[in-house]
Image (spheres, rainbow, N blue to C red):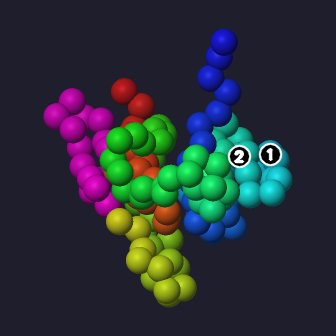
Amino acid sequence: MKLKNILIVVNDLERAKKFYRDLFGLEVVSDQEGNVILTEGLVLQDAQIWEKEIEKAAVPKHNACELYFEDRDLDMLTEKLKAMDEHLRESGGSGIQYLTPLKVLPWGQKIIRFYDPDGNLIEVRTPA
């Protein structure tokens, strides 16, 4: 047995596809009826389909799990996040919400935690 994908619930598939493409370079592998598979094994599921399937409401910002990425240039990522924040606010959204602003850990590794537009927690660190 092996883990194939990680699924997250989103309210707006087009916005989520753009977010993950623009920020992390993930591309669409498959797009079928509210279920989008991106490169690196990330699956975006339409919230209405997910909630109907499990008969429960999706809970954004539940902080029980996160998507973990590594990137050598968190300063560049921070600039991308600032631009996305402006765009999201201009289009009526709440912008990027941070849980942990960019900081340097005692051993020199950088870290940042923030939510995607649908309340899924993301952590990005520089490689150890």
Q: Quadrant of the N terminus?
A: top right
- Towards the viewer: 76 or 91: 91
**Residue 32 appears in the figure:** yes
Which residue, as the protein is rendered here, is positioned at the far left? 106
Is-magenta flag for residue 66? no
Measured as percent of width and height from the top left, residue 75 is found at: 39, 55
Is-magenta flag for residue 103? yes
Query: On the rendered structure, is 46 left or right of 104?
Result: right
- Towards the viewer: 19 or 12: 12
Residue 3 location, quadrant: top right
Measured as percent of width and height from the top left, residue 95 is found at: 42, 74
Measured as percent of width and height from the top left, residue 98 is found at: 32, 60
| Mark 1–mark 2 CB contact (< 8 Å) | yes
Q: Identify the secondary structure beneath mark 2.
A: strand
The crowding category of the residue bearing disc 1, from other C-alpha atoms within 10 Å (few below 14, some 14 to 19, many at least 20), is few
Q: Main secondary structure of the magenta part?
A: strand
Measured as percent of width and height from the top left, residue 16 is found at: 61, 62
Q: Which mark is residue 29?
A: 1
Q: Identify the secondary structure beneath mark 1.
A: strand
Q: Residue at x 82, y 47 (%)?
A: 30
Q: Is residue 75 above or below residue 90?
A: above
Amino acid type at image mark 1: Val
Distance in Å between CA atoms under marks 1 and 2: 5 Å
**Residue 79 appears in the figure:** no
What residue span does the magenta drawing correspond to? 98-112
Q: Which mark is residue 38?
A: 2
